[in-house]
Image: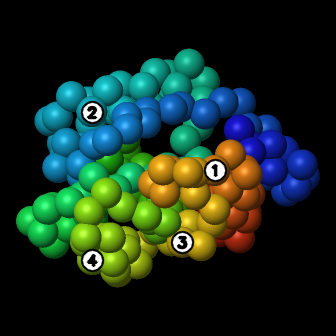
Amino acid sequence: MSFANALLRSGRAGAPVLGLVPCAVGGTRMAEWGKGTQLYDDMLRRARVAVETGGRIGALLWFQGESDTVRWSDANSYGRRMAMLVRQLRADLGTPHLLVIQVGLASGLGQYTEVVREAQKGIKLRNVRFVDAKGLPLQDGHLHLSTQAQVQLGHMLAQSYLNYGTSQL
């Protein structure tokens, strides 16, 4: 919500933000989001319903990866899997230039957090942006962002979206 509110307050968001299409599922690995999986199919279905009911997809906000820090194989394949997800989603939605704003991990469940972070930073696809959550305050469990940090991240995502330029969307 802080993302949407920041866009509305900016006065520069072009058409009003009519809604967000949440598809988050906690504790998932990137491998679970590949084309043909239940998570991918649900995300695609929700996005299509939003468009069919008069919406327009302006961007994909992606904050995922803590579970990919546990096993080397998941961390090592994160970049390849993320790039494939972006390509497949753009193709399936018919939006070849869809803006993707990926959040860099602030923490992880395992020892390969930096491997995943480097993969996130290294995605070299057109219209893929990186917003870094590292350094934002974490809850007591030291995994998830605090409420204050989530609000701050929403503002950072909105700024990235606005910097991209709504005229390109």
| Residue 95 x/y as whole percent | 42, 50
Q: Distance between the residues labelled 2 and 1?
A: 26 Å
Amino acid beneath label 1 = Ser
- x 73%, y 51%: residue: 148
Determine which residue is flagged by label 2: 39
Quadrant where the C terminus lies?
bottom right
Indicate the secondary structure of the residue bearing disc 4: helix
Which is closer to the viewer, label 2 or label 1? 1
Amino acid beneath label 3 = Lys
- Do labels 1 and 3 touch, CB within 8 Å? no
Determine which residue is flagged by label 1: 146
Using the rendered image of the protein, determine whether residue 58 is visible from the camera's viewpoint. yes
Q: Which mark is residue 134?
A: 3
Determine which residue is flagged by label 4: 115
Using the rendered image of the protein, determine whether residue 166 is visible from the camera's viewpoint. no
- Tell which of 19 and 30 is nearer to you: 30
Amino acid beneath label 4 = Val
- x 20%, y 67%: residue: 75
Indicate the secondary structure of the residue bearing disc 1: loop
